[in-house]
Image (cartoon, rainbow, N blue to C red):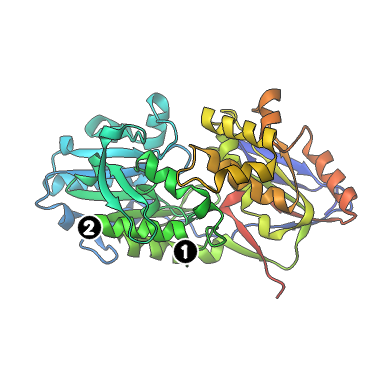
Amino acid sequence: MSVSESIALLYGRGQLTLRMPVHAEVTLIEKGRLKKIADPAAAVRQAVSEPINSPSLAELARGRKSACILICDITRPVPNHLFLRPMIETLVASGIAPNSITILVATGLHRPNLGEELAELVGDPWVIERVRIENHYARNDADHVDLGLTATRGTPIKLDRRFVEAELRIATGLVEPHFMAGWSGGRKVIAPGVAHHETIRTFHSARFMEDPLAVQCNLIGNPLHEEQLEIVRQLGDLYSLNTVIDDDRDLAYVNFGEIVASHAAAVEFVNGAIRVPARRRFKTVVTSSAGYPLDKTYYQTIKGMVTPMDILAPGGTLIIASECSEGLGSEEFRAAQRRLIELGPDKFLATLTAKSLADVDEWQTEMQLKPMRVGRISLYTSGLSDEERALTGVEAVGNLDETIARSIARAEDPCVAVIPEGPYVVPYYDAG
């Protein structure tokens, strides 16, 4: 690639253009091409009328007096505008009154989505005008039902009563790689999506986070996934609508059905496109935090650091661009980052291993330790103050092109891997 050629990284609501050194040998790592669905409305109608391992949505709704539909929060680019209205119209046509339908935003321990942000999230004024839309608040004890403990690992099962007590319960979401739970969507929208803080903090304790099978794109033996399945079995009678989107955030796949089977089908559809083999490891890896909305905070940016770890050569440099338009993240996350800086990685991790309940948001700092063990991390951002940059614990850089050139020179290796979509693509080392 010559210096006149360029590569665009997703950044905020736009892109950043990289000008690579003339001697750089660039390997562009992108997911397989997903075919756009030509008629998304028809695809949604077909999904809810021809479900996987369940009756149709219309049949499920007959005779039921209430329904709760879970949607992901603003950190996920789920195409809610495509499916919420047809789902609600189907429920109402089958006899459920609009005032008995609740859309519940599965915030986990994230902040609520309100006002204009909620309108953007839902994406359809018709929906906002006709049904109740509420946020989940994980710290409100009275909002949750205690269903005991999972049999395998003793995770407390405390879930939002608005979902538990609804007669028809549906999770909706986007199936994409998740750096701890393997894949997002399906069962994950319930736990941690609408779980009590004790359930969430158990999931995110070191005994789960440090498990080598708690990684992206892996469900086999993944302790988080296994606990989520136990919770699903405990609840029983759950359904999900699952979507997959392409590089342009257009719909590439949608299904509906029993929550475990429909999620598994979506994972099978997308797995081959998302996981991309690389024939070598690289001393310079350049990636993004996938742009808006995932790169709104440094907290979410860490996902983009963890996902390409398998192709980062030991001692190499991982360069990540993330706008961080909302800053670092929560106050709890800020406190965890401060402890990381004060204690150092080893002592910080030692403070986590004896806990059965993780402190809120410290798990993301724990995940940052993983790529830090492999190599150097350089962050390009326009959204963090100098104080916040110091709390990241990584090198803050002001010029991507110069940072790439320095990494090549330091490594004495012109080979560079570039991942424009960040954590939406999962590269893995395959020597062949």
Q: CA distance from mark 1 to mark 2?
A: 22 Å
Residue 21 placed where, x, y %? 86, 47
Can residue 323 be seen in this snapshot? no
Q: How many marks overall?
A: 2
Q: Which residue is mark 2?
A: 237
Q: Secondary structure at mark 1?
A: loop
Mark before the other along the chain sequence, 1 or 2: 1
Residue depicted at 54% across the width and 58% down the height: 211
Give the camera-side residue of 163 and 234.
234
The amino acid sitting under disc 1 is Leu
Residue 364 placed where, x, y %? 56, 42
| Image vertical order of residue 380 relative to residue 316, above or below | above
Is 78 placed left or right of 141 in the picture?
right
Is 85 placed left or right of 176 in the picture?
left
Residue 387 placed where, x, y %? 68, 24
Q: Residues within 10 Å of mark 2 (few under 14, many from 20)?
A: some
The amino acid sitting under disc 2 is Asp
Is 405 placed left or right of 353 in the picture?
right
Q: Which residue is mark 1?
A: 219
Can residue 417 be seen in this snapshot? yes
Is 32 placed left or right of 374 in the picture?
left
Give the camera-side residue of 79 and 333.
333
Residue depicted at 84% across the width and 47% down the height: 407
Residue depicted at 15% across the width and 57% down the height: 59
Give the camera-side residue of 239 and 331.
331
Residue 35 placed where, x, y %? 50, 60
Residue sticking out furthest to the front: 354
Give the camera-side residue of 140 and 326.
140
